[in-house]
Image (tube, rainbow, N blue to C red):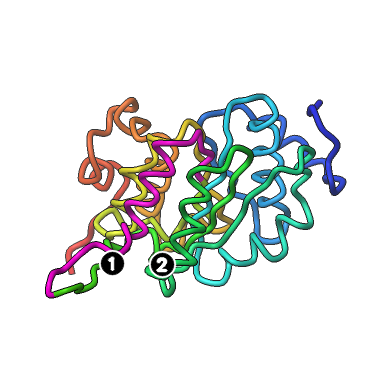
């Protein structure tokens, strides 16, 4: 049983999912849409926080969905029994402003539980530069570097929501998140439809939660994966 009271009563499958995954380093929650994947993730970070294993939740999600975590899911489901939560949605439209920089610095320095949600596109943004007195200077580190700072300085549960957005190995968002994911002691993918076009969709999603998974199973790279699971026909 958890060390805290659930804020919303779970269904049987949610409770089982929570108990099965709460201490796992990597885990895929591949339930159908609308059956409570977010509930498991939020109660997992509460468990990890209260047991001293993690103090930050990073959620990368599609545009709009990332805000829903802050506006709806966290107020509804997160117990946060210690009442020391700092949460904000990273905005690539504002990330060069003084106000947004202050929020990011607060997320890095906060002593309690921190939650940051951001879009997949924001996670790939480069430093913001501005010209001052005839010289170009870095005004803000950008989303990619901010993620690196957050993962390096805090013990994170790293969540890729609707993780099929990282199904393409050569896409910038996929390469960025897969490269950064080992810095998080805990990683999750959430998706109701992880496979849309075929088995190739799974390669990078699984690699996000366990970078050595395929290698341990004798699959050295994506080309080997496609040769093993693909059936190729002449056009």
Residue in view at x 39 percent, y 36 percent:
152
Tag 1, which secondary structure? strand
Earlier-in-chain disc, 2 versus 1 = 2
**14 with respect to 196 (left or right):** right
Residue 45, by quadrant, is: top right
Tag 2, which secondary structure? loop
The mark found on residue 94 in the picture is none
Q: Quadrant of the C terminus?
A: bottom left
Compared with residue 42, is residue 119 higher up or lower down, i.e. above or below? Answer: below
Compared with residue 148, is residue 214 higher up or lower down, i.e. above or below? Answer: above
Residue in view at x 79 percent, y 57 percent:
76
Give yes or no for contact between labels 2 and 1 (Cβ–Cβ under 8 Å).
yes
Residue 114, visible in the rendered structure: yes
**21 with respect to 126 (left or right):** right
Q: Which residues are magenta?
A: 134-158
**76 with respect to 86 (left or right):** right
Position in image of residue 47 (x %, y %): 70, 32
Residue in view at x 35 percent, y 43 percent:
180
The magenta stretch spans residue 139:
yes
Position in image of residue 197 (x %, y %): 40, 63
The residue tagged 2 is 95
Residue nearest the observer in this picture, 200 or 24: 24
Circle 2 crowding by C-alpha within 10 Å: few under 14, some 14–19, many from 20? many
The residue tagged 1 is 128
Residue 14, visible in the rendered structure: no
The magenta stretch spans residue 123:
no
Compared with residue 51, is residue 103 higher up or lower down, i.e. above or below? Answer: below
């Amino acid at each position: 049983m958890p060390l805290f009271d659930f804020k919303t009563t779970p269904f049987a499958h949610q409770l089982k999912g929570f108990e099965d995954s709460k201490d796992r380093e990597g885990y895929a929650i591949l339930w159908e849409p609308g059956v409570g994947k977010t509930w498991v993730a939020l109660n997992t970070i509460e468990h990890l926080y209260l047991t001293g294993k993690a103090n930050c939740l990073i959620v990368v999600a599609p545009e709009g969905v990332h805000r829903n975590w802050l506006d709806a899911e966290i107020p509804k489901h997160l117990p946060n029994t210690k009442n020391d939560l700092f949460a904000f949605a990273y905005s690539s439209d504002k990330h060069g402003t003084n106000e947004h920089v202050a929020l990011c610095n607060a997320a890095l320095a906060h002593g309690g539980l921190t939650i940051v949600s951001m879009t997949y596109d924001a996670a790939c943004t480069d430093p913001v530069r501005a010209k001052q007195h005839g010289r170009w200077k870095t005004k803000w580190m950008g989303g990619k570097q901010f993620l690196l700072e957050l993962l390096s300085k805090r013990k994170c549960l790293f969540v890729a929501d609707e993780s099929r957005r990282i199904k393409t190995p050569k896409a910038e968002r996929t390469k960025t998140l897969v490269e950064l994911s080992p810095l998080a002691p805990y990683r999750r993918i959430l998706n109701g439809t992880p496979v849309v076009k075929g088995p190739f969709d799974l390669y990078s999603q699984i690699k996000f939660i366990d970078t050595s998974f395929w290698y341990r199973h004798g699959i050295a790279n994506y080309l080997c994966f496609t040769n093993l699971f693909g059936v190729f026909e002449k056009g």
